[in-house]
Amino acid sequence: MKNRNLSVCEFMEGSREEVIYVDIREEQYARYGTIGEAKNIPAGRLQELYRLPRDKKIYVFCQKGEISGEIVEVLLDAGYDAYHLEGGYLAYLATL
């Protein structure tokens, strides 16, 4: 797999016109905070991810950056241009 890990700075550089941000954490976690206007699609509802447009980059994050890497693999296999936030939401919080 090509390097699909993004640092927090790289992750935040995506423009809304070109990137869809997806928070794959469970709803109860996303409710307390997320990144920007990320769509909350929990990892357990994987089928919903396949409804995302294929003409944009998909930036995925979870709590620690572990599960999002696996989800990116699945999205790549399905033909998406997907990336994940290295270190997850916790890495993002550490930069605030």
Image (cartoon, helix red, strand yellow):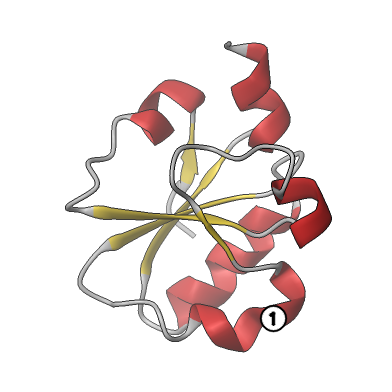
Name the residue that disc number 1 marks: 45
Residue at 44% x, 46% y: name it: 37
Asked whether, in this view, residue 60 is left or right of residue 67, the answer is left
**Residue found farthest to the front:** 31
Between 68 and 37, the residue placed more toward the observer is: 37
Residue at 28% x, 77% y: name it: 54
**What is the x, y in percent for residue 41?**
61, 68
| Tag 1 secondary structure | helix
**In the rendered view of the protein, which quadrant contains the C terminus?**
top right
**What is the x, y in percent for residue 75?**
49, 74
Is residue 26 shown to the viewer in this render?
no
Badge count: 1
**What is the x, y in percent for residue 28?**
82, 54
**What is the x, y in percent for residue 49?**
52, 78
Q: Is residue 91 above or below residue 70?
A: above
Asked whether, in this view, residue 16 is left or right of residue 25, the answer is left
Amino acid type of the residue that numbered disc 1 sits on in the rendered structure: Arg
Asked whether, in this view, residue 73 is left or right of residue 2, the answer is right
Quadrant of res 79:
bottom left
Q: Is residue 37 above or below residue 74?
A: above
Residue at 45% x, 72% y: name it: 76
